[in-house]
Every structure is written in C-alpha cells, then in structure tokens.
C-alpha cells in the first residue's frame, strides 16, 4: 500500500461502460472525474464527497488542498 493514511476511491464499472469512483458510499475522486457515463470522457462529472462541481471549481479545490493552513503561515516570527 502507498505511504498514505487515506484509502483511495474504489473504481466501479457498470455493464454499459459507466465508470464511477466511490469513497465512503459517495461519488468522490481527487484524481479526476468521479463519474464517466458510458465511458464517454466528454460527459465526465466531478464530485467530492458526493457534491457535484464544475471542472473549473474542482480544479481550484484540488489546488487548495495542499500546503500550510492559513494560521500556520510562513510569516517571520521573531523570538526575543
């Protein structure tokens, strides 16, 4: 297993070719679209924790998930 504390989403494929990524019983995928109807990449849909997002909003959320929180900023803290 990878060096990650979270498990990956499970990939499910239906008989009609629909591809779904499920995590904790909800559509969810940080790595790409969570729902690809009938295997057609042009109709892809993006979900995080079961909430549908546009592709632009999903990409923005993925960029924001890494790094320091706002309260642990890298601002200079002088010690006296």
Image (cartoon, rainbow, N blue to C red):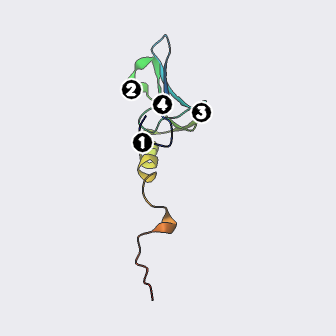
Q: Quarter holding the N terminus?
A: top left
Query: Mark 3 Cα within 10 Å, few/some/many (few <14, many 20+)?
Result: few
Q: CA distance from mark 4 to mark 3?
A: 13 Å
Q: Which residue is mark 4?
A: 34
What residue sits 38% from the left and 25% below the top?
41
Q: Which residue is mark 3?
A: 24
Q: Earlier in the sequence, mark 1 or mark 4?
A: 1
Q: Earlier in the sequence, mark 2 or mark 3?
A: 3
Residue 35: give its label.
Answer: none
Q: Where 70 sits versus 24, above or below?
A: below
Q: Which residue is mark 1?
A: 3
Q: Which residue is mark 2?
A: 42
Disc 4 secondary structure class:
loop
**Label 2 close to label 4 by CB (< 8 Å):** no
**Label 1 close to label 4 by CB (< 8 Å):** no
Q: Where 65 sits versus 22, above or below?
A: below
What residue sits 49% from the left and 65% below the top?
70
Q: Nearer the viewer, residue 79 or 23?
A: 79
Percent x, y of residue 4: 45, 42
Q: CA distance from mark 1 to mark 3?
A: 20 Å
Badge nearest the viewer, 4 or 3: 3
What residue sits 43% from the left and 53% below the top?
66
Q: CA distance from mark 2 to mark 3?
A: 26 Å
């Amino acid at each position: 297993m990878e060096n990650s504390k979270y498990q990956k989403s499970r990939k499910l494929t239906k008989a009609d070719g629909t591809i779904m990524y499920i995590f904790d019983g909800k559509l969810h995928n940080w790595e790409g679209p969570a729902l690809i109807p009938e295997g057609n990449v042009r109709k892809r849909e993006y979900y995080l924790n079961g909430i549908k997002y546009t592709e632009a909003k999903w990409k923005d959320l993925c960029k924001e998930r890494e790094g320091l929180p706002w309260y642990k900023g890298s601002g200079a803290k002088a010690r006296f």
